[in-house]
Structure formats: structure tokens, C-alpha cells
């Protein structure tokens, strides 16, 4: 067994990687005849791993014994990249709404409803993010969020000028919803996969990449929509394609992530 009593985690033993911890857990859980030797249970809010009848250790305690390693950089890069993609979309809400209102000839009430619908979807996404993460897992929630953002932005870029305003409002609601789901999902996945001593630095790195995404968004808006969406010469459709492709480009990074232990 790779995991066992506290003695096996002693200083004389080589450090375990989080990948080994996760794969060992999966291996034992997939073998019915080893159920007595390897069991996973819950203790309050903690996952407890009991291997070969030795001292049970929570997943959090096991991560603390493993300590920091390369996987923490993978967390920062992958989840931070997803945060950057979300920043590109949500940071450009104002110019995109101006361009949508102008292009689709929205009324004053419809134009006023755009931010309400978008941030209403964001609020609902935040509320449902936790249940979605518990139901489908943190990693899948991230993947669904990114793929939905990409799909919605590409659809928005291809809508004809005579599109019904209701369709515009629905796309903006879904965009806000999808963008909000990944924020808690990414943070929870990062925290649950890191030793306690490294969590603050991991979350800081992810937030830093998200902030950098807003800087990239500002430069992209200056290039594609210099009139902030109010001029017919603004290339807002091209910008939507860029945001959609940015979200798609982060999807391969999800391959390197492991679900929370």
C-alpha cells in the first residue's frame, strides 16, 4: 500500500505526489476485494482515507504531509487560465452591451435590461455553483463553465441583425451564469487540492492571473472596440470570437487537473 500509518509518512520516506495520492485512492476504491483494506469515509466536512486497517488520515492531513510540489503550479496555471478567460468576458460587459443595443436596435427598456439580466444570471450561477460542484465535481463544473462561455460568445458573434431581443437577453443571462459558476468551483478545487501552508499562495496566484485577464481585456477592447461599442466601425463580433476562442483554449489545460481528493 502506498498510504498507511503515520510512520509511512515519516521523514525517512520519499515524499508522495498528490497524483499518487489520488491514483492510489482510486485504485483501492475500484477493487471490491480490497474494500476491507482501503475505505473512504466522511468525518464532518473531511474525507477520511483508511488503508490496510492502519491509522485513518483525512485527505487534508495527507495533503499536509505531502507538502507543496509541482501540482500546485499546475493548479495556478490551469485554474488561473480559466479565470483569465472569465475576466475577458465579464470585464467587457459594458462595451458589448452598447454594441448589442446599437446593432440589434434595442429599445430603452431592453437596453436597460441587459446588465440586469447578465448580473442576475451571475448571481444565480454563484448560488448554484456549490450544488453543481457537489453533484458533478469541481473539475467538471469548470469545464462546463468554460465550454458554455465559449459557445455563448461564438453564438452571439454570429447572430443576424434581425435577431429577436429575447434571444439576446437569454444569451446574456447564460453568459453571466456560466461565468459565475467557475469562480467558486476553481477556488474550491485549488484549496481542497493544496496543503494548508500553500493555500493562500495558490489562491493569490489564481487571482493574479484573473486580474491580468482584465488587463488583457482592456487592451483588447481598445483594439477591437475603440468607441466602446457605440460606433459601427467597432468590431464587437470579432471580439466575441476572441473571447470564445480564449475560453476554448483553456479547455486542454483541464486535462492536467485532478478532482478534489
Image: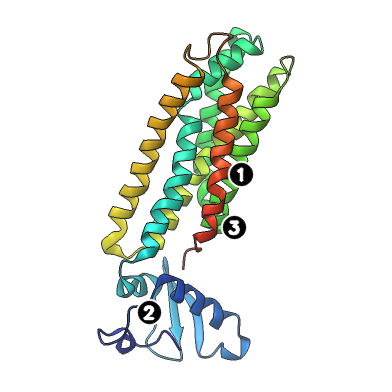
In the drawing, does residue 6 fall left or right of residue 101? left
Place of residue 214 in the rendered image (x, y in percent of width and height, measured from the top left): 40, 32
User: Which residue is tagged 2?
Assistant: 57
Q: Earlier in the sequence, mark 3 or mark 1?
A: 3
**Pointer 1 local density, CA inside 10 Å: few below 14, some 14–19, many at least 20:** some
Q: Along the line of sight, which residue is nearer the eye, 127 or 164?
A: 164
Picture residue at 48% right of the left edge, 31% below the top: 90
Question: What is the residue that sits farthest to the front in this orientation?
Answer: 223
Q: Along the line of sight, which residue is nearer the eye, 129 or 226?
A: 226
Pointers 2 and 1 in contact (CB under 8 A)?
A: no
Q: Is residue 73 above or below residue 85?
A: below
User: Which residue is tagged 1?
Assistant: 147
Place residue 50 in its image quadrant: bottom left
In the image, which disc is placed on residue 136? Answer: 3
**Pointer 2 local density, CA inside 10 Å: few below 14, some 14–19, many at least 20:** many
Q: Is residue 126 visible?
A: yes
**Pointer 3 local density, CA inside 10 Å: few below 14, some 14–19, many at least 20:** few
Place of residue 104 in the rendered image (x, y in percent of width and height, measured from the top left): 66, 13
Place of residue 121 in the rendered image (x, y in percent of width and height, measured from the top left): 56, 33
Picture residue at 50% right of the left edge, 17% below the top: 225
Disc 3, SS? helix
Which color scheme is applied?
Answer: rainbow
Disc 2, SS? strand
In the drawing, does residue 140 fall left or right of residue 73? right
Place of residue 96 in the rendered image (x, y in percent of width and height, measured from the top left): 54, 21
Q: CA distance from mark 2 to mark 1?
A: 36 Å
Q: Earlier in the sequence, mark 2 or mark 3?
A: 2
Picture residue at 53% right of the left edge, 30% below the top: 120
Label 3 or label 1, whichever lies nearer to me, is: 1
Q: Earlier in the sequence, mark 2 or mark 1?
A: 2
Amino acid at each position: 500500500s502506498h498510504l498507511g500509518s503515520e510512520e509511512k509518512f515519516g521523514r525517512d520516506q520519499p515524499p508522495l505526489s498528490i497524483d499518487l495520492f489520488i491514483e492510489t485512492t482510486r485504485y483501492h476504491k475500484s477493487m471490491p476485494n480490497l474494500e476491507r483494506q482501503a475505505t473512504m469515509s466522511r468525518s464532518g466536512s473531511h474525507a477520511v482515507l483508511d488503508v490496510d486497517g492502519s491509522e485513518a488520515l483525512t485527505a487534508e492531513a495527507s495533503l499536509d504531509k505531502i507538502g507543496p510540489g509541482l501540482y500546485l503550479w499546475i493548479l495556478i496555471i490551469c485554474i488561473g487560465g480559466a479565470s483569465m478567460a472569465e475576466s475577458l468576458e465579464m470585464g467587457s460587459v459594458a462595451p458589448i452591451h452598447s454594441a448589442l443595443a446599437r446593432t440589434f436596435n434595442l429599445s430603452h427598456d431592453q437596453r436597460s435590461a441587459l446588465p440586469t439580466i447578465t448580473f442576475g444570471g451571475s448571481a444565480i450561477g454563484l448560488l448554484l455553483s456549490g450544488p453543481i460542484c457537489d453533484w458533478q465535481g469541481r473539475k467538471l463544473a469548470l469545464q462546463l463553465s468554460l465550454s458554455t462561455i465559449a459557445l455563448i460568445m461564438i453564438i452571439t458573434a454570429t447572430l443576424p441583425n434581425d435577431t429577436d431581443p429575447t434571444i439576446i437577453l437569454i444569451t446574456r443571462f447564460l453568459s453571466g451564469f456560466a461565468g459565475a459558476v467557475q469562480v467558486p468551483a476553481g477556488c474550491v478545487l485549488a484549496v481542497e487540492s493544496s496543503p494548508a501552508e500553500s493555500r493562500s499562495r495558490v489562491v493569490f496566484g489564481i487571482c493574479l492571473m484573473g486580474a491580468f485577464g482584465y488587463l488583457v481585456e482592456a487592451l483588447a477592447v481598445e483594439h477591437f472596440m475603440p468607441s466602446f461599442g457605440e460606433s459601427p466601425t467597432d468590431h464587437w463580433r470579432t471580439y466575441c470570437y476572441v473571447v470564445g476562442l480564449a475560453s476554448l483554449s483553456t479547455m486542454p489545460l483541464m486535462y492536467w487537473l485532478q478532482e478534489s481528493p
